[in-house]
């Protein structure tokens, strides 16, 4: 409701890309990796920080143990409810950054439905990356490459409607393939989406 007056109003200018001197001149990969939106570099930075935080800090271990076994974690004096709420809030902040990228960097306006199901692709990406922030960087490049393929194949006369479906078809295929794996090897938190009630056995 707060954003309703801004729906469909174009921005006067789009956020400029950041170009890293010398590195951006490297053939092929220079423009791909070193001449990008500030959100691109922020995403890489946040993924690396998240990996370090979850794997190498005490609070990160508490967060992971809360997802695996909240009862055992609480016996160590950890506030399970606080960690869960804060984790959801931080995750929501990351999602907000993704939405900001779409509206002020990827395009020049904000319209309803502009996410177009990309949130579900992000969930599939998380599963494909086995819940590991470091692997998620490479998984994001893979899914991003699938998005780009649809534009590269348009001059070949392939149906635009079919090409627009490619990212979502790839998402479904990856989810099907991952479902065939042993659930213990997916690294998903054991208590994912399961409410925790203190005192229950």
Image: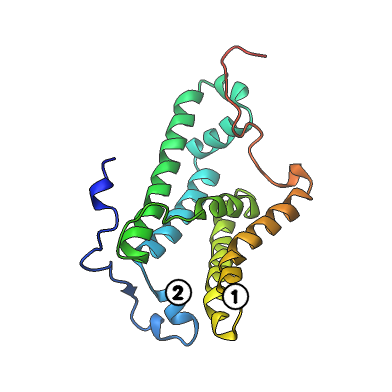
At 59% from the left and 25% from the top, the residue drawn is: 70
Residue 199, image x, y percentages: 59, 11
Q: What colour scheme does the image use?
A: rainbow
Of mark 1 and mark 2, the one earlier in the sequence is: 2
Residue 137, image x, y percentages: 53, 61
Question: Eyeballing the image, is 200 above or below 159?
Answer: above
Residue 40, image x, y percentages: 41, 64
**Foreground of the two, 104 or 131:** 104
Which quadrant of the structure image shows residue 46? bottom left
Residue 31, image x, y percentages: 42, 80
Identify the residue at the far top of this view. 199
What residue would you read off at disc 1?
159
Marks 1, 2: nearer the viewer: 1
Mark 1 to mark 2: distance in Å? 30 Å
At 49% from the left and 80% from the top, the residue drawn is: 29
> Crowdedness of circle 2 by 10 Å Cα count: few (<14), some, many (20+)?
some
**Foreground of the two, 145 or 134:** 145
At 54% from the left and 68% from the top, the residue drawn is: 147
Q: On the rendered structure, is 27 left or right of 156?
A: left
Quadrant of the snapshot with the C terminus: top right
Q: On the rendered structure, is 156 left or right of 1?
A: right
The mark found on residue 33 in the picture is 2
> Which type of secondary structure does the marked residue at label 2 adopt?
helix
**Foreground of the two, 172 or 111:** 111
The mark found on residue 142 in the picture is none
At 58% from the left and 80% from the top, the residue drawn is: 153
């Amino acid at each position: 409701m707060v954003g309703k007056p801004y729906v469909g109003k174009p921005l006067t200018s789009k956020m400029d890309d950041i170009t890293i001197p010398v590195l951006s001149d490297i053939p092929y990969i220079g423009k791909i990796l070193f001449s990008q939106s500030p959100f691109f570099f922020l995403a890489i930075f946040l993924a690396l920080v998240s990996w370090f935080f979850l794997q190498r800090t005490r609070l990160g271990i508490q967060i992971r143990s809360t997802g695996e076994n909240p009862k055992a974690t609480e016996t160590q004096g950890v506030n399970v409810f606080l960690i869960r709420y804060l984790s959801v809030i931080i995750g929501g902040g990351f999602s907000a950054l993704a939405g900001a990228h779409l509206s002020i960097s990827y395009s020049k306006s904000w319209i309803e439905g502009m996410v177009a199901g990309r949130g579900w692709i992000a969930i599939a990406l998380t599963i494909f990356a086995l819940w590991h922030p470091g692997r998620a960087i490479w998984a994001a490049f893979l899914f991003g490459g699938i998005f780009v393929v649809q534009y590269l194949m348009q001059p070949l006369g392939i149906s635009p409607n079919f090409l627009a479906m490619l990212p979502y078809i790839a998402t479904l295929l990856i989810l099907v393939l991952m479902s065939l794996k042993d659930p213990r090897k997916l690294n998903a938190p054991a208590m994912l989406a399961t409410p925790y009630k203190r005192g229950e056995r």
